[in-house]
Image: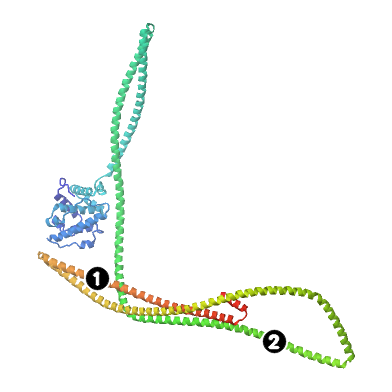
Amino acid sequence: MEFQTTRIENKDLCNVLLKWLQTLHLKTPHRTLYDITDGVALAEALNQIAPECFDDNWFSKIKKDVGSNWRLKVSNLKKIVDKIQDFYQDCDTQHMGNFVKPDVIKIGDQDDTMELARLLQLILGCAVNCQNAQDYITNIRSMDEKSQTVIMQSIQDLERIQGHPQSIITTSLGVDTDDHQEQIQQLINELQSVTKARDQMTQRCLELDSQVSLLQEEKTYILDEKRHLEERLLESVEDPLKGSGQRRQIEELKEELDDYRIKLKTQEREMADLKIKFDLLQETAGEARLLKDELDILRDTADRVEKYEATIQSYKKKLEELGDLKRQVKILETKNIAYIQQNMELEQEIKKSSMWKSQLEIYKKQVTELHHTLNDETNKTDKLEFESKKLLENLNTLQKEKDRLVIERDSLKEANEELKCCQTQMKKTSTLEHSQTTSSDDMESAMDLKQKLVRLQHENTMLKMNQKEPEEDKISVLQSILDNTRQQYNELRLDNRKANQKILELESELKEQTENNNEWNSKIKELQSQLQCEKDTRSLDIEEKNTTISDKDQFINILQVSLHQKDMEIQEWEEKHKKFIEKAKSVVKSMDAKNVSLSDVDISVLESRLIKANKEISDLKKEQENYKASQEIEEKLISTAFYKLAQTKMQESVDQRVMNQGLLQSQTFLSKQRQQTNKTVELNPPKSRILSSYKLFD
């Protein structure tokens, strides 16, 4: 930025801006330009203008008792300029643009008024763009007119460099928008009247053009008539009788021609006047266009003003939100401190929990042993359940046989009792008949016997006669039954042969299956041996992992001891660092009091010591973080190893159970087949073999 030195001299500008600075009622001295060069008064003014940006924390970094030390002045002024730049960057409506930063070295060392004026102008821009801008504008208005004009020009220069054609601040300081509105309204009215006149003139021009075209057509028509008349004249000269009448016509036509010429001249004059008026109207239309462009520009500026007002309101809201966010940040910082304390307590609890790790391992071993015992007991219970089921089945069959035998016994008892009753009755009847026969006569008995014999002979003859006819029928039926039985016998013989062939095939297959079963038994034994080997290897791996876990626990304890030692070393280094800083501050203060500057060698030595101390602290912190990360990784590895161990143990128990069940099933199946083969061998007839083969197929 280059100030307009023709209008305002730098010293006058500095004095006016100093007057404005004195209206802020600051605590630090600010009567002369020399009092401001240390930057303390300027920092206090910025803290008063925008405390949300130039807060107390930033103001505390400004060194107060500077004296004549130009380096401290320059450092204060650098902080002020950087913070002002941040303020302008935070405000989206304000941009530094082509603004040249004030040279703080010239201000601190040479008390340059031009650079100081730049810095004061930036502070004035901060005051005009802050939240309480209206209060500072009223303070500026309360000053005298000369200082007001100077401040106004400096604000306009700053806005021009930032790229703002017209600002709200300049309008609030002295630019009245009502006059502009009246001028705009007048221009709009004039433009409307000019456009109406232009439209009327264009319509008039069109009418005149149409009239001119009609007159030209009439002119051509008259010229044609003139030519015809001249031809007739020539003919009339040749013909003297017709000449008198034609002369009269020629004279009349000449008079008409003269009238038309007069009309043409008047219309040409009117056309020239209309062209002049048309040119004037075009000029006025061009002016109206320019006025319309200016009006559009003014409308754009008015729209921008509204937008800027809206953005200012939005930024005010953002500033309020920023204050809320700062409060939230403070709350989060307090929460963070509380979480850090909780972390420290948790670390102490972790150190205490290392004592319980050994007991936890013992409990883990006990749990694994209990799991093994539980698996054994479950296997035993499964076996006992299977045996109990078998015994229950046998008991049910025996119970059924017992019930059947009881029923047979009861039926036999009843039959025996009935037989006994029948025998007693027979004995009684035989005794009675014997007594009667002895008492009756022998003659009666002989007659009865003869009659009975005759009857029996008659019945026998009748039966023989009756039996001769059905016997022939029975013979034919028996012959057909015999033929059927022979066919069935032949079919059964063929079936028997086929069944014998199948039995032979099945016996060969059974032999092969027995051989395969032997092979399967050998394979099962091999698998059992492999499983045993894997079990041994896994048990060895588990023992190795347990040893590694114990070694890592020892290593963790060693690392915890070393970490405690390094924490103590860090605390010692921090205490030494603080002592070095305090010594350096005391040395700097004593050197400033004596106005003696430290040598570059001493400063470099102190800086190197500080750098070394910071490096050592950072290295120790990194080691601590690495140790914490390694500790977390080791804990995760221990937990994963424990879970893997438990999983492998469970898998081994499941595999053993599956193998035991598989062996039992295989033995029962083979024993059943052998029993069935033995039964088929014991049965002699072929039907038993067929049944055994069907059983095998099933």
Q: Kindly indicate the quadrant of the structure image that contains residue 676.
A: bottom right
Which mark, residue 474? none
Residue occupying image coordinates x 62% and y 83%: 400
Residue for badge 2? 412
Q: Amino acid at mark 1?
A: Lys
Q: Amino acid at mark 2?
A: Leu
Q: Position of residue 124 (x, y in %)?
A: 21, 53
Is residue 452 shown above or below 586?
Answer: below
Q: Position of residue 369 (x, y in %)?
A: 41, 82
Q: Position of residue 385 (x, y in %)?
A: 52, 81
Is residue 392 shown above or below 88?
Answer: below
Q: Residue furthest top?
A: 241
Residue occupying image coordinates x 30% and y 68%: 336
| Residue 628 vs residue 159, the one in the foreground | 628
Q: Secondary structure at mark 2?
A: helix
Is residue 488 shown above or below 75?
Answer: below
- Report whether residue 427 is seen: yes
Which circle, 2 or 1, is nearer the viewer?
2
Residue occupying image coordinates x 37% and y 20%: 218
Mark 1 Cα-neighbour bin, 10 Å: few <14, some 14–19, many ≥20: some
Q: Quadrant of the C terminus?
A: bottom right
Q: Tell me the colour scheme of the image.
A: rainbow
Mark 2 Cα-neighbour bin, 10 Å: few <14, some 14–19, many ≥20: few
- Report whether residue 341 is seen: no
Q: Position of residue 151 (x, y in %)?
A: 20, 49
Mark earlier in primary sequence (2, 1)? 2
Residue for badge 1? 621
Apparent side of residue 33 relative to residue 659 in the rendered image (left or right): left
| Residue 585 vs residue 113, the one in the foreground | 585
| Residue 381 vs residue 539, the one in the foreground | 539
Distance from Cα at disc 2 to Cα at disc 1: 105 Å
